[in-house]
């Protein structure tokens, strides 16, 4: 990452969000999304986005896309929101859990894998294996 480039990473969060909040395994039903803006030449900036009520899978994708998010870390996700993220050009990565701060660090250190079909669920169940 060059000195002026910024990257916004979002994590569906439990509790009240923030760097110490846990990953919420239910992407579409999380309390909020913690967005971490990472810049090589500054401290990380944290933005909390309330997960607004939505009637389809596109709502959270549109919310994150409108805030410039380029990476989302999830425990699992449904097929339709996964497809919407791909169409929006937002990369998905999978984790089995941890705090937002830990997960962002894992991503930056290259310890997370891109989400593939094995991380896609039918909805309604826990996403951790």
Image: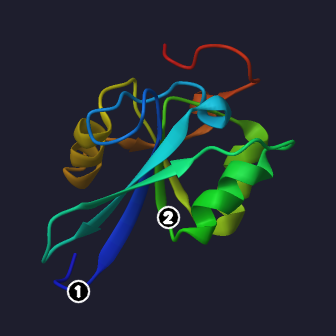
In the picture, measured across the screen, residue 25 lies left or right of residue 6, that is: right
Is residue 56 visible in the rendered structure shown here? yes
Is residue 83 visible in the rendered structure shown here? no
Q: Position of residue 25 (x, y in %)?
A: 53, 24
Foreground of the two, 12 or 89? 12
Relative height, residue 104 to residue 79 (above, below): below
In the picture, measured across the screen, residue 19 lies left or right of residue 92, that is: left
Q: Quadrant of residue 54?
A: top right
Disc 2 from disc 1: Cα separation: 17 Å
Relative height, residue 88 to residue 57 (above, below): below
Q: Position of residue 111 (x, y in %)?
A: 25, 41
Residue on which disc 2 sits: 69
Residue on which disc 1 sits: 4
What kind of element bears circle 2? loop
The colour style of the image is rainbow
On residue 54, which mark appears?
none
| Residue most extreme to the bottom | 4
In the picture, measured across the screen, residue 58 lies left or right of residue 101, that is: right
Q: Earlier in the sequence, mark 2 or mark 1?
A: 1
Quarter that holds the N terminus: bottom left
The local crowd at label 2, few if under 14, some if 14 to 19, many if 20 or more residues have their Cα within 10 Å, is many
Q: Quadrant of residue 42?
A: bottom left
What kind of element bears circle 1? loop
Q: Position of residue 53 (x, y in %)?
A: 76, 41
């Amino acid at each position: 990452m060059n000195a002026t480039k910024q990257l916004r990473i979002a994590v569906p969060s439990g509790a009240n969000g923030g760097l110490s909040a846990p990953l919420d395994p239910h992407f579409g039903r999380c309390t909020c999304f913690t967005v971490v803006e990472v810049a090589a030449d500054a401290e990380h900036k944290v933005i909390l986005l309330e997960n607004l009520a939505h009637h389809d899978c596109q709502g959270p994708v549109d919310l994150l896309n409108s805030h410039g998010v380029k990476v989302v870390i999830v425990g699992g996700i449904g097929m339709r929101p996964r497809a919407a993220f791909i169409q929006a050009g937002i990369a998905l990565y999978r984790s089995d859990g941890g705090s937002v701060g830990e997960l962002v660090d894992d991503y930056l250190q290259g310890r997370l894998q891109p989400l593939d079909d094995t991380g896609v669920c039918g909805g309604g169940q826990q996403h951790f294996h």
